Image: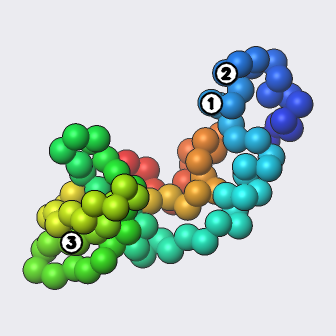
Amino acid sequence: MSSDADMAIFGEAAPYLRKSEKERIAAQNKPFDAKTSVFVVHAKESYVKSTVQSKEGGKVTVKSEGGETLTVKDDQVFPMNPPKYDKIEDMAMMTHLH
């Protein structure tokens, strides 16, 4: 992995390609629960980050980051990668690929 100084060659695009060192450290230290952090199919926004509230009978109730409570089929719920994998350079290191 290259340093932040090496990313300068990408100019204005650099922040979109990789997080800064400070942001990467903050992401690694952010609390994350792999069992409850998910992406859910959403009618208006395609997918939204959510937290699982309950599961029963093939339905999952989640609370989105926007505060909306949704009940969806369990096949519309996808596990989320830990925040430390945001903008990761090698996708083979990711836990989940969707």
Q: Which of the marked residues, 1 or 3, is nearer the chain's N terminus?
A: 1
Q: Which of the marked residues, 2 or 3, is nearer the chain's N terminus?
A: 2
Residue 26 location (% of width, % of height): 72, 58
Q: Secondary structure at mark 2?
A: helix
Q: Residue at position x 31%, y 67% from top?
A: 63
State the mark number for residue 13: 2
Give, as a three-letter code, the residue at label 3. Answer: Val
Question: Residue under circle 3?
Answer: 60
Crowding around mark 1 (Cα neighbors within 10 Å: few <14, some 14 to 19, many 20+) is: few
Crowding around mark 3 (Cα neighbors within 10 Å: few <14, some 14 to 19, many 20+) is: some
Gap in angstroms between the C-alphas marked 1 and 3: 33 Å
Looking at the image, residue 28 sits to the left or right of residue 68; the answer is: right
Residue 68 location (% of width, % of height): 28, 60
Residue 67 location (% of width, % of height): 34, 61
Question: Residue under circle 1?
Answer: 16
Q: Residue at position x 76%, y 57% from top?
A: 25
Looking at the image, residue 56 sits to the left or right of residue 96; the answer is: left
- Proximity of marks 1 and 2: CB atoms separated by less than 8 Å: yes
Q: Secondary structure at mark 1?
A: helix
